[in-house]
Image (cartoon, rainbow, N blue to C red):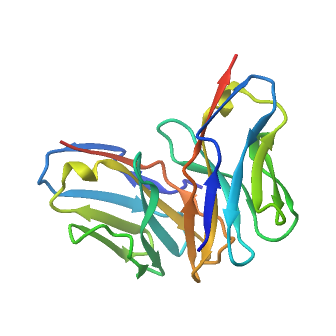
Amino acid sequence: AQSVTQLDSHVSVSEGTPVLLRCNYSSSYSPSLFWYVQHPNKGLQLLLKYTSAATLVKGINGFEAEFKKSETSFHLTKPSAHMSDAAEYFCVVTLNTGFQKLVFGTGTRLLVSP
Amino acid sequence: DAGVIQSPRHEVTEMGQEVTLRCKPISGHNSLFWYRQTMMRGLELLIYFNNNVPIDDSGMPEDRFSAKMPNASFSTLKIQPSEPRDSAVYFCASSGRPEPGNTIYFGEGSWLTVV
């Protein structure tokens, strides 16, 4: 069965330092993978997605993620954190059910300190 | 583009009352999803519609929950009677094509508290 594991429930960084949010997936086929961000009391916004094209995917707000099949990983990175990046981040995989059944990870809360 | 529009944004109701949550998907989208988010269970898919027809409702918790999509621009999620354990954030989402890699757009959620 398809699933995602977000390895850290919380990540704390200082403003201006790099961000790494880790995600490993489990899938019996070539998956579609997404990262969504949720700011406090807001909905979910798509950051980026991988759909079997380029393995390095660039998203909004300077985020990017690399699909590594050998490591079954899809880690999210950003070179320099901003205060506005503080939010909950979800790694998501799509089940091969014939429609877009999203399976969400448990989320990683990113804390950014001045 | 107005995005996915949900109402109400916040609702507090007493146990036993009926709750109706509403959703207007993005114009032209023919896939609509209802998700529920709780601290304990995270984000769960409740029901999926394609072209106004319910395709997968296996995530609907029990008979107290029902969802309808009478036309392409409107859907409701109803809870009757409501219970405190239904307190959660309910998200509506829509997508243009039902292909695995297509982007799903979420509304800002309806925050439900049942007391």
Q: Camera-side residue: B77 or A16?
A: A16
* Residue A46 coordinates in the image, percent (x, y): 65, 53
The residue shown at (15%, 60%) is B81
Find residue B100 and report its image quarter: bottom right
Q: How many marks?
A: 0
x then y, percent, for residue B12: 23, 42
Q: Measured along the vertical axis of the image, is residue B75 above or below residue B99?
A: above
**Residue furthest top as drawn:** A114
Q: Residue at x 65, y 47 (%)?
A: A7
Locate residue A36, reporting x and y percent. 63, 51
Quadrant in which the N terminus of chain A is drawn: bottom right
User: Depth check: A67 or B87 in front?
Assistant: A67
As drawn, the residue found furthest toward the left would be B16
Q: Name the residue at 26% across, 63% down.
A: B78
Whether residue A56 is visible here, answered yes or no, is yes
Residue A108 in the image: x percent, y percent?
60, 42
Image quadrant assignment for residue A18: top right
In the rendered view, does A100 fall on the left or right side of A78? Answer: left
> Quick one: A58 or A24, which is closer to the camera?
A24
